[in-house]
Image: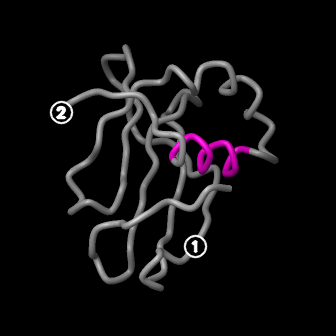
Amino acid sequence: MKRRLLTLPELSLILFLLRDKPAAEKFLAWLPIAEVEELADGGMGSLRFVSRKDEQRLGQKIAELQFLDEDGVPVLVSLYLDQEGALYELDSWKTDYSPLKRIPLF
């Protein structure tokens, strides 16, 4: 998969999800340079954070949010940590399984 930096809307969304979490401060300086890979989800916007760890695994969900895409279809996003507390995945699910049109700025 192709690695890239977060887009401004993705960064805004993740910062919004982290806004009241105790672990947020340790991610703030790193997020603008964090590399991600888009997941094969039909264009719904799911991302995995690139890690240097060999055995990175899904840990706990730390935040969840629902919003409406610009076509009025609900989108559920969940932010997950890995087993050691590092950012692991932003899971995005559009309820009709269509591609995400736009992430609103938060």
Which residue does the image show at 73% across and 34% down from the upper left?
A: 24
Three-letter amino acid code of the residue under disc 1: Phe
Residue beneath disc 2? 1
- Magenta residue check for 64: no
Q: Of the numbered discs in the image, which one, if any, rests on residue 67?
A: 1
Query: Picture coordinates of residue 92 (x, y %)?
Result: 42, 60
For the C terminus, which image quadrant?
A: bottom right
Which residue does the image show at 67% across and 42% down from the upper left?
A: 15
Query: Picture coordinates of residue 45 (x, y %)?
Result: 36, 55
* 26 relative to 19, above or below: above
The mark total stands at 2
Which residue does the image show at 60% across and 50% down from the upper left?
A: 13
Task: From the viewer's perspective, tell me whether residue 63 is left or right of residue 22.
Answer: left
Query: Picture coordinates of residue 104 (x, y %)?
Result: 57, 61
| Magenta stretch in the rendered image | 10-18
- N-term mark: 2 or 1: 2
